[in-house]
Amino acid sequence: MCGEIDEQAVIGQDLLEQLRVMARILGVEGVPSNAAPRDLAEAAGRSSYMEQVFREGLGRALGAVARAEEDEAVDALAAQAIALARLAGFLAGQLPPEADLFRATIEALSAGHSEPRDLAAEKQRENDRLHGHSHDHDHDHDHDHGHGRGHHHH
């Protein structure tokens, strides 16, 4: 590296730190694994089981990415995401098309994709509350936008 900063390693460090923070927020550090699925006939049981599977998978994925070299953390994370998406598709493909699991899987993929942004925004709001300031700069603008409408007499 000869003194110059390896950009991939810096991005990797930031990514690993971000993942550690998220793991703490979600409480997936050292999640006990492989509890038997229970009460799947009820929505609450299914929901609870899906949350468990998500947390176990996230814990495993984050653990693997954390063991990668800093300059390979980004590639490790990308590989995890793509392989797990393939796994989801593979599992969904076991059921007949009328189960419509493919659409549910795609919706879950989409929902999961926006979760990190939502968590980051939530964390920012939490910090702002603790430190007593807001990053909502929208309120600093004067809200006269469009008040000229209807005043033009032709």
Image (cartoon, rainbow, N blue to C red):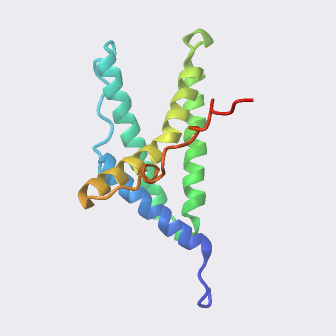
**Residue 72 seen in the figure:** yes
Q: Which of these two is toward me, 137 or 89? A: 137
Estimate the x, y position of residue 112 in percent, counting from the top left: 49, 38
Q: Quadrant of the C terminus?
A: top right
Q: Residue furthest top?
A: 98
- The residue positioned 56% from the left and 42% from the top of the image is 145
Q: Which of these two is toward me, 33 or 130? A: 130
Q: Residue furthest bottom?
A: 2
- Answer left or right for 38 relative to 118: left
Estimate the x, y position of residue 122 in percent, counting from the top left: 36, 47
Q: Residue furthest front?
A: 153
- The residue positioned 60% from the left and 51% from the top of the image is 79
- The residue positioned 32% from the left and 50% from the top of the image is 25
The image quadrant that residue 33 belongs to is top left
Q: Which of these two is toward me, 137 or 143? A: 143
Vertical position of residue 79 compared to residue 84: above or below:
below
Estimate the x, y position of residue 108 in percent, counting from the top left: 51, 30
- Answer left or right for 142 relative to 83: left
Vertical position of residue 2 compared to residue 86: above or below:
below
Estimate the x, y position of residue 49 in percent, counting from the top left: 34, 28
Q: Residue furthest right?
A: 154
The image quadrant that residue 152 belongs to is top right
**Residue 69 seen in the figure:** no
Q: Quadrant of the N terminus?
A: bottom right
Vertical position of residue 45 compared to residue 122: above or below:
above
